[in-house]
Image (spheres, grey):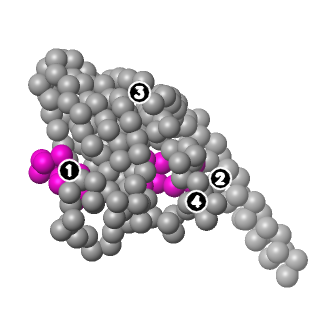
Amino acid sequence: MKKKKKIVLLAVFLLIAAAWGARVYWFNQEYPDVERKTYALQEEAELGKDIIDYDEMDGYFATVESSQIYEYADFLTEYGLNDFTERYPPERIYLLKVRLRNTDNTETGVSFLDWYIQSNAVHEDINLDLYYEINQIDTYSVALRENSEKEFLLPYNLREDFFYPSEWENLEDYEMWLTVTWYPTKKMLLLK
């Protein structure tokens, strides 16, 4: 009786494992990995019909014009924000100067809240409080007029506990990208 029970349990386990494997195989065939496209610093990326958070940004183009890493206190001093306070300030700021261009879109805009910087292991979000202060605007979503462009300063938090010590000490050489679309093509603008 015990032997039959073991055989039945093994058969049930093998059936569940086979069903799970078939489901994983089907899912991978149905939903393949996204294509990734990277752009060099100062190279313009067409956002096109690729989406981020369900929004198309057709007609918009983005370029990282420059990038610089600051110690947090140095950043505040350079931008005259000496009285600025945050509840949990980061140790450093990755400041990007981004040029946004609109050729013919009259329907949508771009949400900087959905853009993030990443490496192979790290994902960092925009610091909205600093973004509002240094750009002197009160919204993270922007819509440009047709045939216009504008530069924005995008400050991203860099927190030491998200990096290995060797990476933290050499952040200037650490490869990171600004991710501006997710699907079907993940477009990533190199920061160095």
Q: Whole-percent x and y of residue 86?
A: 25, 70
Q: Amino acid at mark 4?
A: Glu
Local packing at callout 4 (Cα closer than 10 Å; few below 14, some 14-19, many 20+) is few
Residue 102 in sight:
yes
Q: Which residues are magenta?
A: 117-139
Local packing at callout 2 (Cα closer than 10 Å; few below 14, some 14-19, many 20+) is few
Q: Which residue is mark 1?
A: 134
Q: Amino acid at mark 1?
A: Ile
Residue 81 in the figure: left or right of residue 137: right
Residue 78 placement: quadrant: bottom left
Position above or below: 29 against 167: above
Residue 98 placement: quadrant: top left
Residue 120 in the figure: left or right of residue 112: right
Residue 123 drawn in magenta:
yes
Q: Mark 3 and mark 4 in contact (Cβ < 8 Å)?
A: no
Residue 42's mark? 3
Q: Which residue is mark 2?
A: 19
| Image mark count | 4
Q: Nearer the viewer, mark 4 or mark 3?
A: 4
In the rendered structure, which disc, 3 or 1, sits on the residue that comes first in sequence?
A: 3
Q: Whole-percent x and y of residue 4?
A: 84, 74
Q: Which residue is mark 4?
A: 169
Pick the quarter of the image with the N terminus.
bottom right
Distance from disc 4 to disc 3, alpha carbons, whole Å, reads: 25 Å
In the rendered structure, which disc, 2 or 4, sits on the residue that comes first in sequence?
A: 2
Q: Nearer the viewer, mark 2 or mark 4?
A: 4
Q: Mark 3 and mark 2 in contact (Cβ < 8 Å)?
A: no
Residue 119 in sight:
no
Q: Secondary structure at mark 2?
A: helix
Residue occupying the point 58% across, 54% down: 170
Distance from disc 2 to disc 4, alpha carbons, whole Å, reads: 47 Å
